[in-house]
Amino acid sequence: MPHTLFISDLHLSEDTPNTTKFFHQFVKQIGRDTEALYILGDLFEYWAGDDDLHSAFHAEITGALNKLSKQGTRLFIMHGNRDFLMDKQLAKACDATLLADPTMLDLYGVPTLLTHGDALCTDDTAYMAFRQQVRNTIWQQQFLAQPLTNRKAQIEQLRARSETEKQHKAMSIMDVNLQAVNDMLHEYNYPMMIHGHTHRPAHHLHHIDGHTCDRWVLGDWDKFANTLYCDESKTVWQTFSKNGLQ
Ligand code: LP5
Ligand code: MN
């Protein structure tokens, strides 16, 4: 049955070889009936700029995605909060289309809103202030003008700071704000919504203005490959472990 898969938050890095193994197993078992694969952010643990494209690890990942795309599965990649510096050269290397966040999609007749999800975490005011700073085009140009090694050193500092700060933030603060979700559903005329980021896989129903909207939250790839499968008649979770698809 022709279908579409959604994934996010793989956080691929050389430091997590198990996840990389899942990734390669997952990509290999995708057949021609997977019409499209949507990666909704945080494919990488972090992305320091497209000039880091040619490291052996990055070449291995982009090569696998490129092969998948050339085999006939259309590939779409959205920025996450960790890899928002992915740009045209990365997209070209993967033979993928970079998607704006958010993006509306006609998913087998169902209007569907795709987003990474971090922009919905409006209670996390420290993160939102940081996000506003680093999503600024001029800031990004200045950051990317620095040597790759300097950028990586700054990112390492940021990662450490983020991990420390997260330990002191309430779980509720790091989740999406329900009013922000409802506002977005209203703005886009009550679509189905698919997002990641919070690593809290779930299927929510939002009752808003007389409409019922599905919200699917994608899981991370810590223990196994979490995917959302959609065809013209159903939307279901699909996980992939070393024993195959479940
Ligand atoms: O990703 P996750 O879920 O673990 O945590 C996020 C928020 N943290 C981040 C930081 C990333 O995890 C680290 C890697 C990013 C690489 C980006 C590359 C380019 C930018 C490089 C800039 C040097 O996104 C975390 C949220 C959490 O989600 C839940 O929603 O809480 O947010 C934070 O922890 C951010 C802190 O609260 C605020 C940090 C302020 C840092 C200020 C330094 C500014 C540096 C910029 C200039 C050099
Ligand atoms: Mn994220």
Image (cartoon, grey):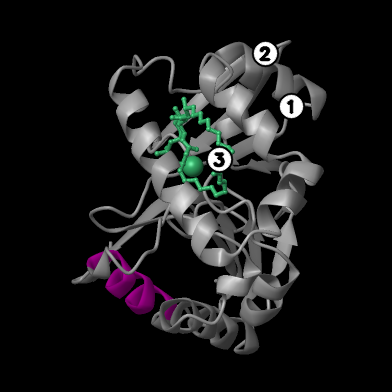
Membership of 20 in magenta stretch? yes
Which SS does the magenta portion mostly show?
helix
Identify the residue at image location x=64%, y=59%: 146
Of the numbered discs 2 and 1, the one sitting upstream in the chain is 1
Helix, strand or loop at mark 3: strand
Give the left or right position of residue 63, taking residue 168 as reference: right
Instruction: Tell me the number on the disc at residue 190.
Output: 1
Image position of 221 with respect to 164: above or below: below
- Mark 1 → mark 3, Cα distance in angstroms: 15 Å
Image position of 73 with respect to 238: above or below: below
Q: Is mark 2 within 8 Å of ligand 1?
A: no
Q: Quadrant of residue 208?
A: top right
Helix, strand or loop at mark 2: strand
- Mark 2 → mark 1, Cα distance in angstroms: 8 Å
Q: Is mark 3 within 8 Å of ligand 2?
A: no
Magenta range: 18-27
Image position of 117 with respect to 204: above or below: below
Q: Amino acid at mark 1?
A: Tyr
Of the numbered discs 1 and 3, the one sitting upstream in the chain is 1
